[in-house]
Amino acid sequence: MSYQLFEVYGIELEYMLVDAATMKVKPVVDKLLTKKNGALTSDVENGKIEWSNELVAHVVELKTNGPTANLDTLDDLFAENIGEINDLLKEFNAKLLPTAAHPLMDPETEMQLWQHNYSKIYALYNRIFDCRGHGWSNVQSMHINLPFLGDAEFEKLHAAVRILLPVIPGLSASSPIFEGKLTGFKDARMHVYKTNQKEIPEMTGKVIPEQLFSKKDYYSRIFEPINKAIKPHDTENILDHHFLNSRGAIARFDRGAIEIRVIDLQECPKADVAIAVLIIEALKLLVSEELVSLEDQKKWHENALFEIFNDVIVDAEATIIQNAAFADIFDLQPESSVKDLWSRIYSLVKENISEKHQKSIEFLLQHGSLSTRILKTLDENPSKAEITKVYEELGNCLQENRFFEV
């Protein structure tokens, strides 16, 4: 089934399973799916939400079961499923942990690959890249899938997505801590994402996709180099180029969608879905050409956008936009912050957003990204006990579908 621009959406949320008492990583997703389903399958349909496994045995993904046009009650649907999963996990002394990164995990010793369906693919990934690293086994994100119909819609959507990608971590950063230490990045997940696949640089590129606006050009400039680079490693031809493309937004021509992947997971679905709604409305605004023409959007080189992105993953919403031409797209003064940029976008699209999501977005704009709020509760060298206390509370926020307030 093909859908037009902004007709429907697909949202995916990844959660880590941890020990309910110690908060250590708990690789029991297979037990969870078996308990729910009666037998182990990689996907479990639970009404409008589907559960599935990921690369590692301690991460479960919840996603819309097919595309949906209704984002107003989606956070409630996710919250119901989270409650059900936490109930099922009690038997295994486990629970779900939100945010994009476990603050204490040692991936060198704690990572376990998924051993069931698709394990051949995951084993190959592990052989090529060595998945014992934060960029592979300690990265929980939200993905937004946006449909397009044909090259004309792809061109508009890809141009808009490329412009917006660098500033998305200003809303969504939630990964300030690795292995008990402040990383110096509010979005450490995206920092490790950049070099995650350094063995085959064709896969990630500059995170921001290249200036490609047709299926033909995309295949020749992205998919063909990826296929060529992977061939010596993938002697059995089991990897698919859609699966291998790891840019911050990837074109899925097999399903007529662009998938945005630079969004850190939040403390609760209420926050995730509100961020998704604001990103979607921002993209509609760019596609409308009300702020800037399509031709001018297409002129932005990935290197210039990557520079902005690199700044934003450090300071999130507090980042000062040094690129005056980029600030000008949104009618901002030079030296404006990313918070100013999102506040400006919100003022232009607010009337299209339901009151429920308006309240959530206003909370985020007022109180800052989740990383900012986490860091406010900790000193520069927090103890393991202090970090654990904060993340216990984040687990409560997830269970109760409420914001983390400082």
Image (cartoon, rainbow, N blue to C red):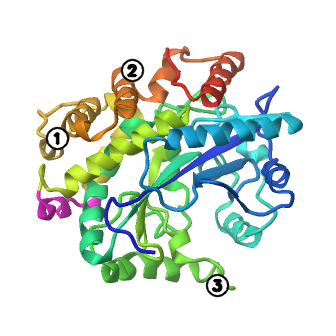
Q: How far is the residue under mark 2 from the one under mark 3?
A: 48 Å
Q: Residue at x 42, y 55 (%)?
A: 69
- Residue 331 as seen in the image, left or right of residue 369: left
Q: Which mark is residue 327?
A: 1
Q: Which mark is nearer the camera, 2 or 3? A: 2
Q: Which residue is mark 2?
A: 367
Element on which disc 1 rests: helix
Mark 1 and mark 3 lie on one chain; the one further toward the N terminus is: 3
Q: Which residues are magenta?
A: 293-303
Q: Which mark is residue 237?
A: 3
Percent from the top left, x then y, of residue 119? 76, 68
Percent from the top left, x then y, of residue 260? 43, 56
Q: Amino acid at mark 2?
A: His
Q: How far is the residue under mark 2 from the one under mark 1?
A: 22 Å
Q: How far is the residue under mark 1 from the one under mark 3?
A: 45 Å
Q: Is disc 1 surrounded by few (<14), some (14 to 19) or many (20+) residues within 10 Å?
A: many
- Residue 388 as seen in the image, left or right of residue 313: right
Q: Residue at x 80, y 48 (%)?
A: 32
Residue 340 picture quarter: top left
Q: Is residue 349 above or below residue 238?
A: above
